Amino acid sequence: MTSDVRQNSEEQPDAPPPKLDDYIAPAPRVSVQAFCETAKTAEAIQSAGVDRRLGKAHLTIKMGGMAAAIEAYHTVPTPNVIILETEGSTDILAGLDELATVCDAGTRVVVIGNENDVAPYRELVRRGVSDYVIGPVETLDVVRSICGLFSASEAVAVGRTIAVVGAKGGVGASTVAHNVAWAIARDLGLDSVVIDLDLAFGTASLDYNKDPVQGIANAVFSPDRPDTAFIERLLSKCTDHLSLLAAPATLERVYDFGADAFDAIFDTLRMTTPCIVLDIPHQWSGWTRRALVGADDILIVAEPDLANLRNAKNMLTMLKAARPNDRTPLYCLSQVGMSKRPEITPREFAKAIESQPIVSIPFDPRMFGTAANNGQMIAEISANHRASKMFVQIAQQLTGRGDGKKPRSSFLSPILGKLRAKKA
């Protein structure tokens, strides 16, 4: 057992439940075995096992608590993580001492106790307990405890993934993704990478006015697992804080992938990049579903018509069911107010979806057409345009950040402000 510890025991047992949008880094591919004493704890751990952040972990549950664990490991090797529930009826310290005699080096132990346990936390640490959680535990408590063992111990800044997808083809989801990524990098000052996952028809390289010779295809078709150095060579620099993993946008080959084809690429980027924006094409396959379900936050882009309403509602229903412990996916309306086109109003759309759109981006063919043809972002053409401010708003809500970086003020700021006001 190791002495790698997060002091969760200092939290009060009557603390409010954790928020669903608290960031929890996914666990790596590890084996976890839990020994429970109550059916309620076993149920919480079973529910945690299907959470997306434990998707790579192999979890098994047995009843019997400490005694069952000691008996089991006399004959079999210990896993990466052992979860032990104690009901206070056994001597925790004596049990841990006995468990240590059969426990392999490097195994991490999580103890689920109760407020009546009398074992001092310092003694638990001395015996190598990695985490101590006061029960009764909920699903998210178990997820946080297991994942926290690795994100904290490895001391690695794990990046957050944001998936942007259209409810229908041609709704401008890629344009939204690219402009939001630009806002995250420029306005929030967060190092970011855009991954264009539409390998055949992706437009990210055009939108950012780049012509990279390498990109996402080199990584996904590589026979070896991509490492950080390899991915860095494939990135195209857009700004100081923004890089692009571009799509080849060629039809020389077909792009049929397995469900986990992009996992290694995402995992590698998460090791070095605080924010990864996934521009997901409008198609339904094993890998697109996996990319959406596995993202930390999701934005669905829809136009205000019936087909988009149906598709967006279906996507939201599926994603909520697949991600019960995550924040509800967000959606925005795009190309709102197109001349002579009958539209579903944002209010009616929200009533049917049962949630409000994060923003309603106005239809402005001149502005968006100019940006697309020039290889520019909307903010580069007009920082004060309504859409530019909306992209910043989306960036803030998806990343959980406020106003981002602000210019340094000086004693002349009030005077300069008055002069600008007079000129206006």
Image: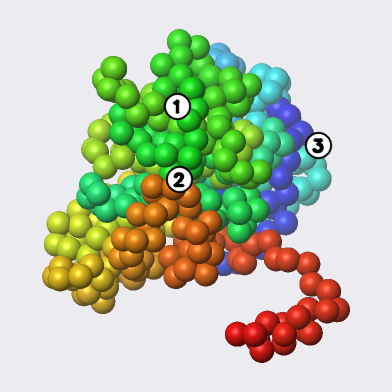
Do the numbered discs 1 and 3 sit on residues whose CB atoms are within 8 Å? no
Residue 123 is tagged as none
Q: Report which quarter residue 125 is drawn in.
A: top right
Q: CA distance from mark 3 to mark 2?
A: 59 Å
Instruction: Judge whether 170 appears above or below 68 on screen.
Output: below
**Numbered circles on residues, count:** 3
Work out which quarter of the rendered image holds the N terminus and state it. Answer: top right
Disc 2 residue crowd, few under 14, some 14–19, many 20+, Cα 10 Å: some
Residue type, mark 3 in image: Arg
> In the visual, does 25 lie left or right of 222?
right
Of callouts 3 and 2, the N-terminal one: 3
Residue nearer the viewer, 122 or 342: 342
Q: Which residue is mark 2?
A: 375
Of callouts 1 and 3, the N-terminal one: 3
Q: Which residue is mark 1?
A: 216
Do the numbered discs 3 and 2 sit on residues whose CB atoms are within 8 Å? no
Of callouts 1 and 2, the N-terminal one: 1
Residue nearer the viewer, 130 or 180: 180
Instruction: Judge whether 303 appears above or below 28 on screen.
Output: below
Instruction: Judge whether 192 appears above or below 382 on screen.
Output: above
Q: Nearer the viewer, mark 3 or mark 2?
A: 2
> Which type of secondary structure does the marked residue at label 1 adopt?
helix
Q: State the image coordinates of residue 383 (x, y, percent, origin top left).
A: 54, 64
Q: State the image coordinates of residue 198 (x, y, percent, origin top left).
A: 34, 34
Residue 84 can be seen, yes or no: no
**Residue visible at 64% across and 85% down in the picture:** 423
Q: Which residue is mark 3?
A: 126
